[in-house]
Structure formats: C-alpha cells, structure tokens
Image (cartoon, helix red, strand yellow):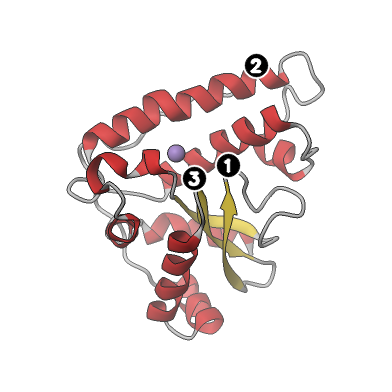
Amino acid sequence: MSFELPQLSYSYDSLEPHIDARTMEIHHTKHHAGYTAKLNAAIAGTPLEGQSIEGILQNLDMSNGAVRNNGGGFYNHCLFWNVMSPSPKTLSGDLADAIHNSFGSFDEFKTAFSAAAATQFGSGWAWLCAHKGGRLEVCSTANQDNPLMPGVACDGVPILGLDVWEHAYYLNYQNRRPDYIDAFFNVIDWGVVANHFEAAK
Ligand code: MN
C-alpha cells in the first residue's frame, strides 16, 4: 500500500485572484506529486510501509532525511489544499471561541499567524495548532517539518497550515510574501478548520 496524491476538490483556477492557477497546477502536479513519490520510495520495504502518515510523522526518526522531508511534504500539502476553498465558510462556533480565548481576538490571531509566516526564514510553514482541551497556538517550522514530528515547534495537532516556500507564491507575488499571506486569509475554509479542531481538541 502506498500513499496517493489527493485530488483537489476545486479547480486550479478557482482560488484566483488570491492564488493563481499556474502556481496551483505546478504546486500540486509537480511539488506535491514529487513528495508523494519520494515518500513511497523511502518507505518501500521498511516497517513504515502500511502505517498512517500521522503515525509515521509522530514516531519519526528525525535523522531519516528522506522520510522527514517527503513525509512532511506529503502531509503538509494534503492539509494545505484541504483548508482552502473558492467558497470558504466563515469562522463561528467553538473554534471562534477558542481563537478568542487563546489570542484575545481574531485580529490578534491573524497578526500572530501572519508574523509567524512572514518571519519564517527561507522555506517553511506557518501553523495553527490545537492542544487537548482546546487551547490554540501559532508556530512555524522550517522546510517540510511539521508539529506532529517529535520535538518540532508547537506540540499540538496542526489544524491550519500555510506553505511559505517560494514555490507557493513566487510566480504571482515574487518576493512579496506578506501580500500572499494576506491573500491566503481570503480562501481559508473555516468550516474545514473547525472540523480539524473538533477532531484534535
Ligand atoms: Mn509547497
């Protein structure tokens, strides 16, 4: 059994103008497909074959560069596609309350998340993570690391992730990462993030 590149539930051009179709297509069919193929190659014939991606990452030997980079890349992009939508649901309910309780207000959360994304040096990701009991935390990771991995950043479960590798935005935004981060907030599907929160807390 091997991991498969997920189909997107929306078309490549449907997140425009916030994220352009060419970036989406290359990102999904080249970058994410590449991580998926290399992950499958790295675990083939090892005890990791057949395990869930979450299990692989939570018990990862961080010195295993092939699984760290490609397992992270596989998982991170699955989450990224999943939390975006051309017709995103607004924030409400328990997750809205948890954001208020953890950050003070939505605007303070947005400021913290945007700062984590903007100040991650080089390639990496910004995360919103949920802890048992419902407390939320913002953090960032380098390369394809993520918070499920041992000893990495916040130790909660990631419920929202933003890819800040240049391949995620350079065609449309060039070096203007902050504009890309602002644009991402227009396509976050808070209904999906709320489902992740309910499962994690
Ligand atoms: Mn990427």
- Residue at label 2? 41
Crowding around mark 1 (Cα neighbors within 10 Å: few <14, some 14 to 19, many 20+) is many
Q: Is mark 2 within 8 Å of ligand 1?
A: no
- Residue at label 3? 79
Q: Secondary structure at mark 3?
A: helix
Q: Tell how many labels.
A: 3
- Residue at label 1? 144
Q: Residue furthest top?
A: 45
Q: Is mark 1 within 8 Å of ligand 1?
A: no
The amino acid type, in three-letter code, at marker 2 is Ala
Q: Secondary structure at mark 1?
A: loop
Crowding around mark 3 (Cα neighbors within 10 Å: few <14, some 14 to 19, many 20+) is some
Which comes before the other along the chain, label 3 or label 2? 2
Q: Quick one: 72 or 166, which is closer to the camera?
A: 166
Q: What x and y, as percent, mark residue 123?
A: 50, 46
Q: Secondary structure at mark 2?
A: helix
